[in-house]
Amino acid sequence: MKVLAALLSILFANAARADCPLDLGHGTGWVVYSNHYLIAFRPEPMRIEVGEPFSLLFNVCTRSNNPAELVAVDAHMPSHRHGMNYSTSIVAGGDGRYRVEGLVFHMPGRWELSIDVRAGEEIERLSHDIVLK
């Protein structure tokens, strides 16, 4: 239990160093991070339904408090070896804020979201699993 508490305090201490808002409204969402980036995102509408289109709202920042560029977002089902039947589009809102439209999870199960970001030349891919029931 002490190890878990120590790991959580390190995570939140590191997250606090970046000036990237982690709360995108409604007090919910996910945070994905690496050594270089901190990404907060949430779905809109808040509940993802099978076969229904939804968007994702993103805040994309570097660990050095600067906005980063969201390059691409896609999703696939590793266990079924296929992706979505639709292409996404990214709408920039400025200062590292983005809206990704055109997402549809056409079947229940584990979806792996791929998030490509950059702040300079090199693109880094981060990922997050979403389980849809």
Image: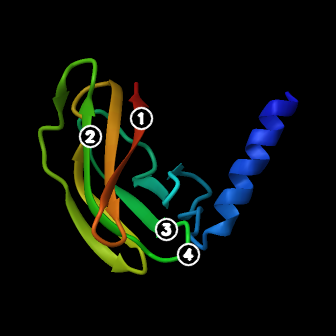
Q: CA distance from mark 3 to mark 1?
A: 23 Å
Q: Which mark is residue 98?
A: none
Q: In terms of image quadrants, where is residue 17?
A: bottom right
Mark 3, residues whose alpha carbon is within 10 Å: few (<14), some, or many (≥20)?
many
Residues at discs 2 and 1 in contact (Cβ within 8 Å): yes
Which residue ends up furthest to the right in the rendered image? 2
- Of labels 2 and 1, earlier in sequence is 2
Inspect the image, locate mark 1, and give the three-letter code of the amino acid beneath it: Ile
Residues at discs 3 and 1 in contact (Cβ within 8 Å): no
Question: Does 3 sit left or right of 94 as displayed?
Answer: right
Q: CA distance from mark 3 to mark 2?
A: 23 Å
Dot 3: element: strand
Quadrant where the C terminus is found in the figure? top left
Residue 83 is situated, as x and y percent measured from the top left of the image, at 18, 34
Identify residue for label 3. Answer: 62
Residue 80 is situated, as x and y percent measured from the top left of the image, at 21, 19
Identify residue for label 2. Answer: 75
- Of labels 3 and 1, earlier in sequence is 3
- Of labels 4 and 1, earlier in sequence is 4
Inspect the image, locate mark 3, and give the three-letter code of the amino acid beneath it: Thr
Tag nearer the camera, 4 or 1 = 4
- Of labels 3 and 2, earlier in sequence is 3
Identify residue for label 4. Answer: 65
Q: CA distance from mark 2 to mark 1?
A: 9 Å
Dot 1: element: strand
Residue 63 is situated, as x and y percent measured from the top left of the image, at 55, 66
Foreground pick, 52 / 100: 100
Residue depicted at x 65% and y 59%: 15
- For residue 127, above or below residue 91: above
Q: CA distance from mark 4 to mark 1?
A: 27 Å
Identify residue for label 1. Answer: 130
Inspect the image, locate mark 2, and give the three-letter code of the amino acid beneath it: Ala
